[in-house]
Image (spheres, helix red, strand yellow):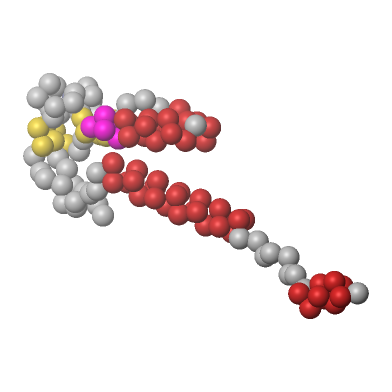
């Protein structure tokens, strides 16, 4: 799963591997995920959508790609969906594990005997 990408920067003339830049901060993303799940998901999607490969020297966004990616990778939305589905399954398992409790065993024979008396 190694990708070899070479780019040329039209801004400063840099040639080589690009650097991946993401907007926002990872710490804020983790914070949102822990305390507020829904904004965390939205924030993660926004960061993934805003992610770009740019020039490591001048952070120029529109570098010219010289070599195509070797491996195909999933989009950010797909990863987020997989996380949500996995969390949903875990939540369901926990919910059912706690909700399915043994009903107290009733004793019809004993009740009949008590009623008869
Ligand atoms: Zn540059």
Q: Is residue 39 visible?
A: yes
The image position of residue 71, as x and y in percent, is 19, 52
**Image quadrant of residue 109?**
bottom right
Q: Quadrant of the N terminus?
A: bottom left
Query: What residue sits 75% from the left and 70% below the top?
Result: 106
Q: Position of residue 59 (x, y in %)?
A: 23, 24
Residue 51: say if magenta.
Answer: yes
Q: Toward which corner of the image does residue 105 lie, by quadrant? A: bottom right
Nearer to the camera, 20 or 83:
83
Query: Is residue 42 covered in magenta?
Result: no
Q: Disc count in the image?
A: 0
The residue depicted at 73 percent of the width and 65 percent of the height is: 104
Front residue of 63 and 12? 63
Query: 109 or 54: nearer the eye?
Result: 109
For the point 18% across and 26% down, the residue is 61
Left or right, residue 64 beside residue 59: left
**112 to the left or right of 19:** right
**Segment tinted magenta in the rendering:** 48-52
Left or right position of 109 against 117: left
């Amino acid at each position: 799963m190694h990708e070899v990408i070479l780019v040329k920067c039209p801004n400063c003339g840099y040639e080589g591997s690009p650097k991946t830049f993401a907007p926002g901060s990872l710490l804020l993303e983790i914070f949102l995920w822990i305390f507020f799940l829904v904004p965390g998901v939205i924030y993660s999607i926004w960061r993934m959508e805003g992610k770009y490969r740019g020039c490591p020297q001048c952070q120029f966004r529109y570098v010219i790609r010289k070599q195509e990616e070797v491996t195909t990778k999933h989009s950010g939305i797909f990863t987020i969906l997989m996380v949500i589905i996995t969390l949903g399954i875990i939540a369901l398992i926990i919910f059912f594990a706690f909700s399915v409790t043994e009903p107290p065993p009733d004793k019809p024979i004993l009740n009949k005997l008590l009623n008869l008396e």
